[in-house]
Image: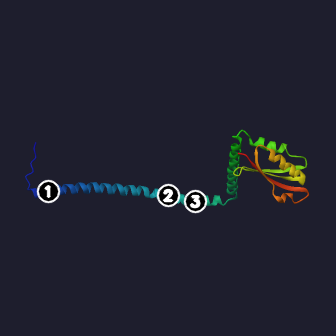
Amino acid sequence: MLHFNILPPEEKKHMETLRESRIAIVWGSTFFVVLVFTALLLLPSYFTLSLQKDEVLRNLEITENSPVAKRVIGIQQSIIALKKNSEDIKKISKNGNSFSSIVANIVEGIPPGITLTALEYDGVLQRLSLHGIADTRAAIARLEEILKKNKNIKDVHIPLSSLVSQKSINFNIAVTVLP
C-alpha cells in the first residue's frame, strides 16, 4: 500500500513542523514529569539527612567535651608517640646493634659513684639522655671517658650546670647514638 501526500509543499512543511513540535512537547513533558517526581522523592530524604547531620554534630560536640573523650584522645596520642619511638628503635636495630644492647653496654660501663635515675631517647635527634646522681666530679669525668670510647656513641655532651657542685651532683648527659 502506497501513501501519497498531495498537499502543497508549504502545507507539507507546516505538517512536518507540527509533528516535530508534538514530539518535542511529549519528550519535554516526560522529562519534566520524571524530574519533578525525582525531586519529590529526594526532598524528604534530604530533610531527613540534614536533621540527622545536625543531631550527629551535636552528639559529636558533647562527646568531644566529655572527660572520657579527652582521656581517649590522650591515650591515642600516647599510642602514636610509642609507635614512633618503636620505629626509631627499629631504625637503630637495622644496623646490627639493637637499642637494648647499646643501652646495656652503656649501663654496664657505668663507673662506681654514679647512679642513673632515668634514660630518655629522642629518635629524631638520635639522642639518649642519661640523668642521675654522681658522688664526685671525677666520677662524671670517668663516665664521660667511658662513653666516648663506646663504638656506638658519636658524641657526648655534658652541660656545665652538671659540674657546678663538688659532691652529690645531679647530672644530665646527652649522648648522640650512631644510626
In the image as oriented, which residue stretches furthest toward the top? 96
Q: Position of residue 94 (x, y in %)?
A: 69, 40
Looking at this view, is 71 or 28 the one in front?
Answer: 71
Element type at mark 3 = helix
The amino acid pointed to by label 2 is Thr
Q: Which residue is mark 1?
A: 13
Q: Residue at x 81, y 45 (%)?
A: 149
The amino acid pointed to by label 3 is Leu
Q: Residue at x 87, y 60 (%)?
A: 164
Looking at this view, is 118 or 81 the one in front?
Answer: 118
Q: Which mark is residue 48?
A: 2
Do the residues under discs 3 and 2 have CB atoms within 8 angstroms? no
The amino acid pointed to by label 1 is Lys
Distance Cα–Cα, label 1 vs label 3 = 63 Å
Q: Residue at x 68, y 48 (%)?
A: 84
> Which badge, 1 or 3, is on the more N-terminal residue?
1
The number of numbered discs placed on residues in the rendered structure image is 3
Distance Cα–Cα, label 3 vs label 2 = 14 Å
Looking at this view, is 72 or 31 the one in front?
Answer: 72
- 2 vs 1, front mark: 1
> Which badge, 3 or 2, is on the more N-terminal residue?
2
Element type at mark 1 = helix
Q: Position of residue 88 (x, y in %)?
A: 69, 46
Distance Cα–Cα, label 2 vs label 1 = 53 Å
